[in-house]
Image (tube, rainbow, N blue to C red):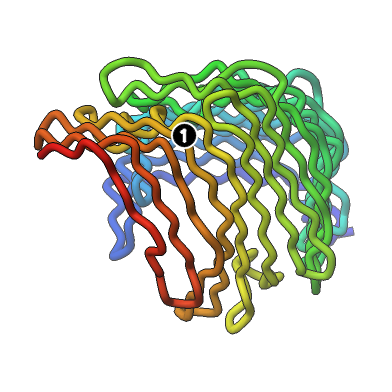
Amino acid sequence: NAANRFMERRRQASLHVNQLKTPWDFSLERGDVDVNLQADLRGEMQISAELQQLHVAEAQITSASLLASGTRAAHRVTISAKGKRQEQDLALDAKLSGALSEQGRWQGQIDTLSGKAWQPFALHSAMNLALGSDEVHLGAGTLQLGQSVLQVQSVDWQAGRLTSSGQAQRIVVADWLAGRQDVASDLVLTGHWQIAQGAAINGEFNLQRVSGDVTWLGGGSPQPLQIKTLQVGAKIVHNQTALQASLTSPRMGNMTISGQAQLDAATWQPAAHTPLDLALVSDLPDLSVFGPLISADLKLAGKAKLNVQRKAINDEVSLQGAISGEGLQVRDAATGLRLQDGVVDIVLNQRQVRLQKLHFKGGKG
């Protein structure tokens, strides 16, 4: 009948855009879109788009292209883009294959994915993908980001609920320090995550040292931290978050940081009008490592102990605890300050800092 003949007819359309400017931070130098398909989408189709000099916020996309060909029941999509963001190269190359249901749900897989954002990235093998108006489902796959490797078990978003789990097979800290001239690192971490976000957040994550160290370069001579063990973990139960971190080092001693906070499930930020508690317990056997962190002219020596708790509700902050040190030495080449055989005892109480003892011998300056 006439209705069937109309739906079976092929439709061709082209759109060409030149010098598109908007009041928002978006502009396009040139764009070409070509569509060739059957009205009911059952026959062969081809959709192509070519964009040149696309500016979106701080990103400048030099060129971008999309090509989709096949049928609704089986088609392939190729996406490519190159550009810059704040002088950093951007690139994306992806190939997908799948099918579009009559209800508008796309299901298939990411066949290949590679590119560069702040680090080069690449998908090691195909990853299942499903997209709908209110859902995104991403299957298992291995993603390389710089030198780091993430094993994604699943990522699911549906009707405002997000769940994700996976393993950080290898986190190379140097990837996160790119561009820093004052820090060098060959530290490698491993870990896992399992998160569910809906009306409340539940889950956990953990990171721990496998090998390597961090070296401070900003104070003239390199200062390795000599990290032996490092662990960072958190558990979240109905938005209540408990953080625990520990570090051991011959130079840094034993350090433990713990924290408690109530999260806002929508923003992942500490909820308003709820306490944010932090505690630091540390035994620092060698203060010389901290001098170059403050100034290249400053030299410190001695040892110290810290046991400090910080509680904050909005802008109200209070401190509890104690700080002590002995065998302290301070030498500042810039000012000529020279202190030695120092002892210090400080008590923190709410908003008060009480200096119980401060004593140096042989002072000069």
Q: Is residue 164 above or below residue 226?
A: below
User: Which residue is drawn at the image coordinates 54% and 28% (left, top)?
Assistant: 92
Q: Is residue 72 visible?
A: no
Q: How many labels were placed on the picture?
A: 1
Image x and y of residue 337, in percent:
15, 37
User: Which residue is drawn at the image coordinates 60% and 66% (left, top)?
Assistant: 269
Q: Residue furthest bottom?
A: 273
User: Which residue is drawn at the image coordinates 81% and 30% (left, top)?
Assistant: 127
Quadrant of the image occupied by residue 154: top right
> Is 36 left, or right, of 163 in this rendering?
left
Q: Is residue 44 above or below residue 93?
A: below
Crowd tier of the residue under label 1, counting other residues whose Cα lies within 10 Å: few below 14, some 14–19, many 20 or above: some
Quadrant of the image occupied by residue 232: top right
Image x and y of residue 153, in percent:
86, 36
* Nearest to the observer: residue 144 or residue 180: 180
* Nearest to the observer: residue 229 or residue 88: 229
* Nearest to the observer: residue 223 or residue 6: 223
Image x and y of residue 85, in percent:
36, 37
Q: Is residue 285 above or below residue 233?
A: above
| Quadrant occupied by the N terminus | bottom right
* Circle 1 residue: 50
Say which amino acid is labelled 1. Glu
| Quadrant occupied by the C terminus | top left
User: Which residue is drawn at the image coordinates 64% and 64% (left, top)?
Assistant: 268
Image x and y of residue 151, in percent:
79, 29
* Nearest to the observer: residue 231 or residue 147: 231
Task: Provide the secondary structure element on which disc 1 rests.
Answer: strand
Q: Is residue 78 visible?
A: yes
